Amino acid sequence: MPVLYVAGVSISDNIKDIPEKTLSIIKKCSVAVGEERKVSLKLLNAAASSAELYLINEHTEDSQRYEILKAVEQAEYSVFFSDAGTPCISDPDYKFISICRDKGIIIKSLPGPSSITAAISVSGINAKTFFFAGFPPREKEKRKKFFENIEKSNITHVFMERPYALSATLKDMLFFKRKISISLNLGCEDEVTYYDYPNKLLEKLDGIKAPFVAVIAGIKKI
């Protein structure tokens, strides 16, 4: 029965952060499914892998997923990874895992880093219970509602946003009445976490473009 490994990889840009076990499993796979060609080839080269590479990202159609499925079905071992962190959590592609599962392919995890838990761990915010909100909507009214729901919630929230949207996100959060945690470049040498009110963070970070994760504590019940 074919086996598909779902591999978590480094959230930094350093291939050396990836465990030897993960690299050795990638090396034995004859099919690899990545997110972006340049990053995927860098990982395959680090693993000395000659796997045939396929790509899945936000533009992938179901017809393409089924074509990749055929390759996985014909291979003894395949591996699926995203550009950074653990696949299928905001990154692609739970749909592909679902169709593989439904076809009887054995799915196995290769646990790795997650920027979600990394951001929580350095935030100093209570996250015994938390809600991962994914990415904020782009449409204006839906985006506004997204932040309003977080601001009034009593549960810790975590969300990601695109690197170029840091300033815009802080502007969207100016009405917040409590401090928030913003972690930039998690896992990299220049990683930094700020904890302050959105207006203060905007003064420091306006115009900066970097991958980031936000953590916001819930409102304490009176």
Image: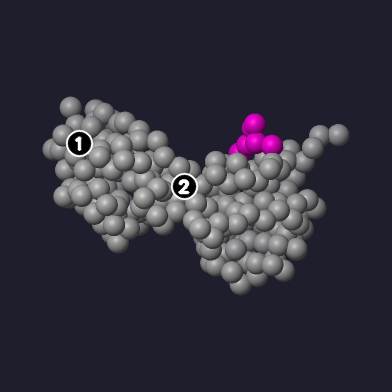
- Give the residue number, with chain letter if any, for mark 2: 90
Say if residue 36 shows up in the picture: no
Give the residue displayed 23% in from the left and 32% down from the top: 3
- Of callouts 1 and 2, which one flags the residue occurring earlier in the amino acid sequence? 1
Q: Amino acid at mark 2?
A: Ser
Q: Quadrant of residue 130?
A: top right
107 relative to 198, above or below: above
- Give the residue number, with chain letter if any, for mark 1: 77
Measure the C-alpha gap from mark 1 to mark 2. 25 Å
Give the residue displayed 57% in from the left and 60% down from the top: 139
Q: Can you say which quadrant of the picture contains the N terminus?
A: top left
Q: Which residues are magenta?
A: 126-131
**For residue 91, which numbered disc appears in the image?**
none
Q: Residue furthest right?
A: 222
Residue 14 is a magenta residue:
no
Give the residue displayed 26% in from the left and 29% down from the top: 106
Please name the predominant secondary structure of the magenta segment in the image: loop
Image position, residue 200 (x, y; %)? 75, 63
